[in-house]
Image (spheres, rainbow, N blue to C red):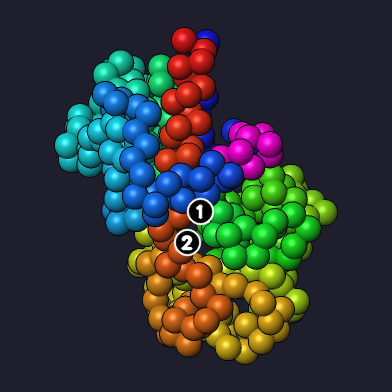
Amino acid sequence: MKPRHFLSLFDLTPTELQHVLQRAAELKALYRSGKRYAPFPGKLLGMIFEKASTRTRVSFEAGMVQLGGDAIFLSSRDTQLDRGEPIEDTARVLSSMVDLVMIRTFAHTTVERFAAYSSVPVINGLTDYNHPCQLLADMQTFIEHRGAIRGRTVAWIGDGNNMCNSYISAACQFDFQLRIAVPVGYEPNENLLKQAAGRVVLLRDPLIAARNADLVTTDVWSSMGKESEQERRLQDFSTYQVNAEIMAQARPEAIFLHCLPAHRGEEVSAEVIDGPQSQVWDQAENRLHAQKALMEFLLSDKQDSA
């Protein structure tokens, strides 16, 4: 039987996603109580990083150790991928030696090709197309602070990037309404927009997008790989900063999220990200617990099908 992978939110059913989030909350409670829960002694996570990371690396590595296993960090310079070995060959070899693989890379086809030849579950730690693990943490954070997200309104303001694509997927899987405010020329994936028809509205005015929203979120204006466009992007996104004026349009109890790292004074004002509506620090910590729940789900599924 082929292993289950997590390359996008659509790889799990809505029911399975809810199970993972419920389990993440339980694992967080265990962690904070000081109780040790290590169900996977001897299990090994292989981590391939072609993009730099703080939260992804630490949360996956710490998470696997907390589950009783261990993790191996591999940058592109540490593998034969940097010398041109086909991703399919690396997948065959690496998956014969570890129990789980996480990949953080540029092209989404890289994780798809790896997963197609892997004998163990593969997790997408971020691609230029999407960032599903971050959305698990985001959904966990909203549920912790405001309850169920089903039927709520979320405002995405900024670039139609991989995080925006992930919020479109989340709108489908978690059944909320998503308003996306982006400048012309920075729209998210067209196929995802079609798939989410009825749940997603594309706008140009961030004030309209934020009106009566339960959650307001954004990301940097120049993602990794887009640094050469920074000056132009600063101009194009100059009216898309999430600031006090934007948050005033949202519901009084609305929260603000940002996947980090943040550039205060660009996509978000310091007043907002450091203010009382911001839950970005819980959001960052929840990467650890959501990913532990995800790894537990995938490893348990692998054991059950063995």
Count of marks, rendered view: 2
Instruction: Using the image as rendered, state which of residue 303 and residue 247 is in the foreground.
Output: 303
* Image position of 297 (left or right of 99): right
- Density class for disc 1 (Cα within 10 Å; few <14, some 14-19, many ≥20) is many
User: In terms of secondary structure, where does tag 1 sit?
Assistant: helix
Q: Is residue 236 visible?
A: no
Residue 220 image point, x, y percent? 45, 69
- Amino acid on which the number 1 mark rests in the picture: Ala
User: In terms of secondary structure, where does tag 2 sit?
Assistant: helix
Residue at the far left in the pictured view:
78
Q: Principal SS element in the magenta part?
A: helix
* Residue, disc 1: 137
At horizontal 69% and vertical 52% (from top left) the residue drawn is 171
Provide the residue span drawn in magenta: 12-20
Q: Is residue 174 visible?
A: yes
* Distance from the alpha carbon under mark 1 to that under mark 2: 6 Å
* Image position of 33 (left or right of 130): left
* Residue, disc 2: 283
Report if the CB atoms under discs 1 and 2 are less than 8 Å apart.
yes
Residue 284 image point, x, y percent? 42, 60
- Amino acid on which the number 2 mark rests in the picture: Gln
At horizontal 51% and vertical 15% (from top left) the residue drawn is 304
At horizontal 69% and vertical 82% (from top left) the residue drawn is 252
In magenta stretch: residue 16: yes
